[in-house]
Image (spheres, rainbow, N blue to C red):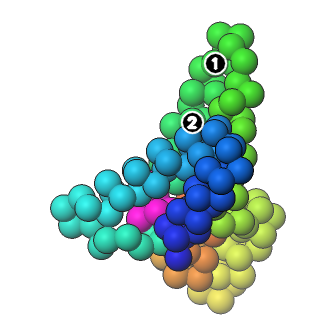
Amino acid sequence: MLYDRLKADLLTARKARDTATATTLTTLVGAVETAAKAPGAPGLTDEVALGVIKQTRKALEGTVQTYRERGIDTAEQDRELALLAQYLPTLLSEDELRAVIEQFRAQHPGANIAQVMAHLKAAHPNGYDGALAARLARA
């Protein structure tokens, strides 16, 4: 379970006195626990943890972009992004995603975008960039 891995890595970072990693993971573990307790949340599942990690990454990427535009050093944020990437699944590349979509369309001529996206979600959960997939499905 992803949450258990986060907790174990947090303990390892604390024992190694890696304060930067420990701080990031403490914040992340807290956010996952909070999200899991939200009304309607399914509890401490991999989906909840993955969602929190993705949200954190997206916010951090926005911060990095803003900092770079203003000429502010982003070394700490880049380190945090690299740490978060360790917990995210490997995404299909653009070429791999295009091949999956083309294969689905060959098997299902006339499939609309919603059907293509539903197939991707079922066949590759959390394994692709949704915006890229939507763009390729429209092409």
Which residue: 61% across, 77% down?
Answer: 124
To which quarter of the image does residue 86 belong?
bottom right
Q: Quick check: 64 left or right of 7?
A: right
Q: Label 1, label 2: how many angstroms apart (C-alpha)?
A: 10 Å
- Please report the bounds of the magenta region as a residue range: 48-52
**Residue type at mark 1?**
Tyr
Q: Secondary structure at mark 1?
A: helix
How far across and down, in percent of the image, does residue 25 sit?
55, 49
The residue nearer to you, when weighing 78 against 117, is 78
To which quarter of the image does residue 41 belong?
bottom left
How far across and down, in percent of the image, does residue 81 sit?
67, 43
Screen quadrant of the C terminus: bottom right
To which quarter of the image does residue 24 belong?
top right
Tell whether position 88 is magenta: no
Residue found at the far right of this picture: 95
Please tell me how crowded label 2 is: few (under 14), some (14-19), or many (20+) other residues with Cα within 10 Å.
some
Q: Examine the rendered structure and indicate whether residue 53 appears above or below residue 62.
A: below
Q: Mark 2 — residue? A: 60
In primary-sequence order, the first of circles 1 and 2 is 2
Q: Mark 1 — residue? A: 67
Q: Examine the rendered structure and indicate whether residue 5 appears above or below residue 54.
A: below
Residue found at the far left of this picture: 39
Q: Quick check: 97 left or right of 43?
A: right
The residue nearer to you, when weighing 19 against 37, is 19
Q: Secondary structure at mark 2?
A: helix
The residue nearer to you, when weighing 132 against 7, is 7
**Residue type at mark 2?**
Leu
Q: For residue 43, say whether it is visible.
A: yes
